[in-house]
């Protein structure tokens, strides 16, 4: 009787170890699949009770000198923020793969066309994609404001942010006056940006 009991105990050891190994494997797989892709900035998208297009962030009022930033534009030339010192500049950090970024492009394009004659410009800084891909996207989307290529996320570092889309408004004196992260609508642009454009 003693030998049979001992034999059964020894046979139960293998299933216990096998069960523990399978459990560990499942945990490792869950952790692996749960990790975020750290190679790209995170997108910011907030659904409203109504529709996504009706949602808008509210810009924060800030006051600090614009960072030094120079990048290649979509046509291959080099431009800097200093080149636009006499204008009110809205720097929009975005990406071709970012849904909320793409959603706000028509709004930005319409606002740009409405106010460009008043000394206002939007600079769209694409975060991380190569020039050919960005150029094709810009043509397809009908974007007419300047687009810069930022393969190394220099703009995100310069403005100290990581979420996309994000935007910063620089006045004619080179001071950053407004900042926001997320999609914005036309009403908010008119309310907060238009008064800065109207300043002498």
Image (cartoon, rainbow, N blue to C red):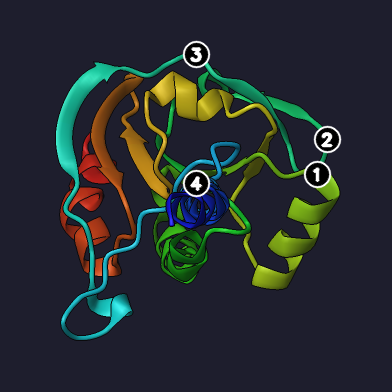
Looking at the image, the residue that sits furthest to the front is 1
**x and y percent of residue 130 in the render?**
79, 43
Crowding at mark 1 (Cα within 10 Å: few <14, some 14-19, many 20+): some
The quadrant in which residue 170 appears is top left
Query: How far, Cα to Cα, is label 1 from label 3?
Result: 22 Å
Q: Is mark 2 on a helix, strand or loop?
A: loop
Residue 131: which numbered mark, if any? 1
Estimate the x, y position of residue 134 in percent, counting from the top left.
74, 52
Q: Is residue 19 visible?
A: no
**Residue 199 showing in the rendered view:** yes
Name the residue carrying label 3: 68
Screen quadrant of the C terminus: top left
Q: Are marks 4 and 3 in contact (CB under 8 Å)?
A: no
Crowding near pointer 4: few (<14 within 10 Å), some, many (20+)?
A: few
Marks 4 and 3, how far apart at CA = 50 Å
Q: Which of marks 2 and 4 is in front?
A: 4
Task: Give the alpha-carbon distance from disc 2 to disc 4, as whole Å.
Answer: 51 Å
Labels 2 and 1 touching (C-beta < 8 A): yes
Q: How far apart are marks 2 and 1 (CA)?
A: 8 Å
Between residue 22 and residue 140, name the one nearer to us. 22
Mark 2 or 4, nearer chain start: 4
Q: What element carries label 4?
A: helix
The disc placed on residue 24 is 4
Q: Name the residue carrying label 2.
A: 76
Q: Which residue is drawn at 21% across and 57% down?
A: 57
Q: Residue 24: x and y, percent?
A: 50, 46
Image depth: mark 4 or mark 1 in front: 4
Element type at mark 1: helix
Position above or below: 102 against 52? above
Residues at marks 3 and 2, CA–CA distance in whole angstroms: 19 Å
Q: Residue at x 23, y 40 (%)?
A: 196
Nearest the eye: 85 or 62: 62
């Amino acid at each position: 009787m003693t030998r049979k009991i001992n034999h059964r105990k020894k046979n139960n050891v293998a299933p216990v170890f096998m069960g523990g190994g399978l459990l560990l494997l499942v945990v490792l797989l869950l952790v692996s699949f749960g990790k975020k892709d750290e190679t790209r900035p995170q997108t910011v998208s907030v659904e409203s009770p109504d529709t996504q297009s009706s949602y808008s962030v509210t810009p924060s009022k800030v006051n600090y000198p614009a960072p030094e930033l120079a990048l290649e534009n979509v046509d291959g030339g080099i431009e800097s923020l200093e080149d636009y010192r006499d204008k009110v500049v809205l720097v929009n950090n975005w990406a071709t793969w970012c849904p909320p970024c793409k959603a706000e492009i028509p709004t930005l394009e319409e606002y740009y066309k409405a106010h460009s004659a008043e000394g206002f410009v939007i600079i769209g800084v694409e975060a991380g994609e190569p020039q050919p891909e960005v150029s094709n996207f810009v043509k397809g989307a009908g974007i007419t404001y300047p687009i810069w290529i930022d393969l190394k996320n220099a703009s995100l570092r310069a403005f100290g942010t990581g979420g996309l889309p994000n935007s910063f408004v620089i006045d004619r004196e080179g001071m950053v006056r407004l900042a926001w992260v997320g999609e914005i609508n036309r009403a908010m642009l008119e309310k907060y940006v238009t008064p800065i454009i109207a300043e002498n």
